[in-house]
Image (cartoon, rainbow, N blue to C red):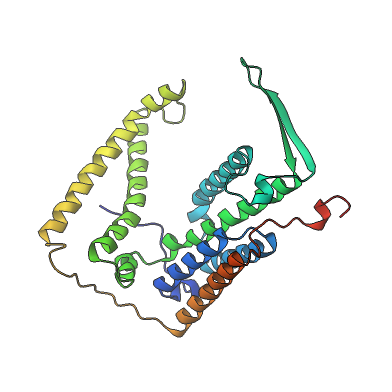
Amino acid sequence: MLVNWKYRPRSTIIQRLDPRARLAFLACMIIAITTLWDLRIVLPLFAIAMTLYLLARIEWQDVKRAWFFILTLVSIIVIINLFLGARGGPPSVRNDQSSLLFTLTSFTVPGVGWSFNIGITVNKFVFVISQFLRMMTMAIMGIPIPYTLDPSLYGTTFKHMRLSDKVAYSIDLAFRLVPSFGRDFTLTMDAQRARGYEVEHLKGGVFERIRRLAPLIVPVLVHAIIAGDEIIDAMELRAFGTHPRTWSRVLRFEMRDYIFMTLGAIILVASIIMGVTQVGTDIWVPPFLTPGG
C-alpha cells in the first residue's frame, strides 16, 4: 500500500496557490540562484525562500529529519568543494589572489608524508557562505512541496502542465513510493527489534555493519519489488496507457496564481539579464573583510 508524506490541510496562502504556480516559481528561483553569486543578491533570494517556507506553517516535528539531512548534506558538499579548489565557483575564487583570513589546520598524511596546510582566504570564505546560501535557498523552496501539496493533485498537476499520462502518473508514484519505503523500513526495524535483533548497537567495520543490516534491507527490497509488481498489474487491469486518462480534479488559475508566477518570471528575467551583463555573477566581498576595510 502506498502512503504519502505528512500532508496536512492548512489554511495558508501557500496551500491556496495552484500547484502549477508553485512549481513554476520554484523553477524560476532555482534557475535564478544558480547564475548568481553576489551576496547582495543571494541574500534577498534566500529571504524570499525562507519567507515562503514560514508562510507554509509546517510543523517542526514533521520536517526536522529533512532539515537535519539537508543541512548535513549541504555542509559536506560545500566543505568538500572548498578543499577541491572551489570547483564550479566564479573565476575570482578559482584563481584566488586574496589575502589569508585564517588557517584551519595543517596535517600530514600517514605513510606517505604529504603535508597539507589548509588556509581560508577572504574570497574562499565569502564563496563558502554564498554557496551554502544558494544551495539552502533551493532546498528551502523544495521542502514544503511534499508537506503542503495535496497528494491527490500530484498526477493532475503534471497532467495540466502538458505532460503525458504516463509521465504524470510516474511522478505521482515517485512522490508516494519514497515515504512508502520509509514506512516499510520502520516497520521492518520494529519487527526485528521485537525478535531481539540489536539494531542500535551494530559493531565491526563498515562492511561488517553493512552485512549485519541485511535483515533490514532485504525484506524492504523484496517488499518493494512485490509492491511494484502489484502496481503494474493494477495498471494493466485498468488498461492504463491504451487511451487518454481522465482526471477527477480540474485545476484553474486564479489572480493570486498569476501574481505569484509573474513575480517568479521577474526574478528569472532579472537573473538572465544580470548573467548576460556579468552583474552579480561573481562574489562580493564585504568591505570589513578586505585589508583596511
Compared with 186, 210 (above or below) is: above
Q: Is residue 284 above or below residue 188?
A: below
Taking the image as shown, residue 270 lies to the left or right of residue 291, namely left
Of residue 251 and residue 54, the one placed in the foreground of this image is 251
Tell me the residue at 53%/65% (across/down).
Answer: 29
| In this view, 14 is above or below 95 | below
Residue under the image location 49 percent in, 51 percent down:
66
What is the quadrant of the C terminus in the image?
bottom right
Image quadrant in which you'd find residue 242:
bottom left
User: Residue 16 appears at what percent x and percent y?
Assistant: 44, 76
**Image-based side of 14 in relation to 44, left or right:** left
Residue 97, percent across and down?
Answer: 75, 45
Q: Residue at x 33, y 65 (%)?
A: 154
Q: Is residue 223 left or right of residue 81?
A: left
Q: Is residue 20 visible?
A: yes
Between residue 188 and residue 286, name the one nearer to us: 286
Q: Position of residue 186 (x, y in %)?
A: 37, 42
- x%, y% of residue 28? 50, 67
Q: Residue extending furthest bottom?
A: 255
Q: Residue furthest top?
A: 111
Above or below residue 42? Residue 107 is: above
114 left or right of 71?
Answer: right
Q: Is residue 58 among the parts visible in the rendering?
A: no
